[in-house]
Image (cartoon, helix red, strand yellow):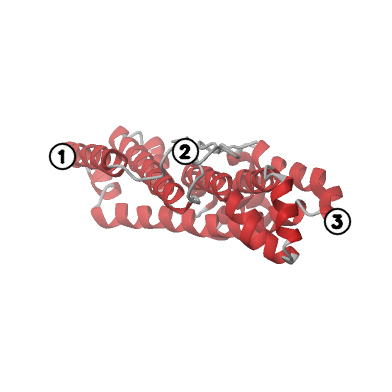
Amino acid sequence: MSTGTSTTTAGAPPATARPRRITVRKLLVTPVVLAVLLLCTYLWITNADLDSIEHNSLDGGQVRLYLWQQVKLTAVSTFFVLVIALPAGILLTRTFARRAVPFAVALANLGQATPAIGLLALLTIWLGIGPRTALIGMVAYAVLPVLSNTMAGLRAIDPTLLDAARGIGMSPLGVLGRVELPLAVPLILAGVRTALILNVGTGTLAAFAGGGGLGNLITAGITTQRTRVLVVGAILTVCLALLVDWLASLAELRLSPRGLEVRQ
């Protein structure tokens, strides 16, 4: 099972595996499209007749602050997702911990099954308003893709490869570090990519929990009935999500072991 956008063909002959490379198209198309979109938005706003509310909301320093907060929320929440989900996914594939799998998966599913705005509202009631509350909600919402993909990647490995590794005298940690994890990398990276996109989207809701971010522009546009402010916040969020997805796809291509097929 994979919640990401990449699939791995295990056991494919090296002669038929698609070469793993970063093409010029892959490298340039997304940045060019994003640059054009941002330039058009900038020209539209700078040539529009803004009132005082719009001018204050779209002040350059204010927009940069919200964008930086959004990036920081995404980066920090993804870091904690990896710290939690990767070790948990590895542990739950070990024989001694398999009885805990249904409980752990149900707990991770609970975080994502709950609507993000509802989860943040509950956490705000419990923990109060602030960036910490927003981060906890974002982490809970994005753990599942990394956890499930880590488990799926490790379980998909051919048992004969593991037996062969043990047969030449590798320790359990050696088998994990030199055989299992390298073969599971494509699925793990796909889960990380999905978690990043989820965190960018959920980060816009951090404004409701006092966490800052581009959601402040969106909510300000709604509450003041200023469409331009709302549109700028939405465009910046979309551009950030596409940029993060592009960077993650390049990392996925670059870090996947040679000989494994990675399809975008």
Comes first in the chain, label 3 or label 2: 2
The amino acid type of the residue labelled 1 equals Leu
Q: Which residue is mark 3?
A: 96
Give residue 129's quadrant in the image.
bottom right
Q: Is residue 1 above or below residue 168?
A: above
| Local secondary structure at mark 2 | loop
- The picture places residue 241, in percent across and down from the top left corner, at 41, 43
Horizontal arrangement in the rendering, residue 151 relative to residue 9 (left or right): right
Quarter of the picture containing the N terminus is: top right
Q: Earlier in the sequence, mark 2 or mark 1?
A: 2
Q: Kindly identify the amino acid type of the residue bearing the numbered disc 3.
A: Phe
What residue is shown at x 34% (from left), y 45% (from top)?
Answer: 22
Question: Which quadrant is home to the C terminus?
Answer: top left
Circle 3 packing at 10 Å, graded few (<14), some (14-19), many (20+), is few
Picture residue at 74% right of the left edge, 66% below the top:
169
Q: Which residue is mark 2?
A: 15
Using the numbered discs, state the Cα–Cα distance from disc 3 to disc 2 in whole angstroms.
38 Å
State the image coordinates of residue 65 (x, y, percent, origin top left).
34, 57
Q: Residues within 10 Å of mark 1 (few under 14, many from 20)?
A: few
Amino acid on which disc 2 is placed: Ala
176 left or right of 72?
right
Q: Which residue is mark 1?
A: 43
- The residue under the point 47% across, 38% down is 15
| x then y, percent, for residue 218 | 40, 40
Please report the residue visible at 41 percent of the width from the left and 55 percent of the height from the top.
71
Closer-to-camera residue (125/172): 172
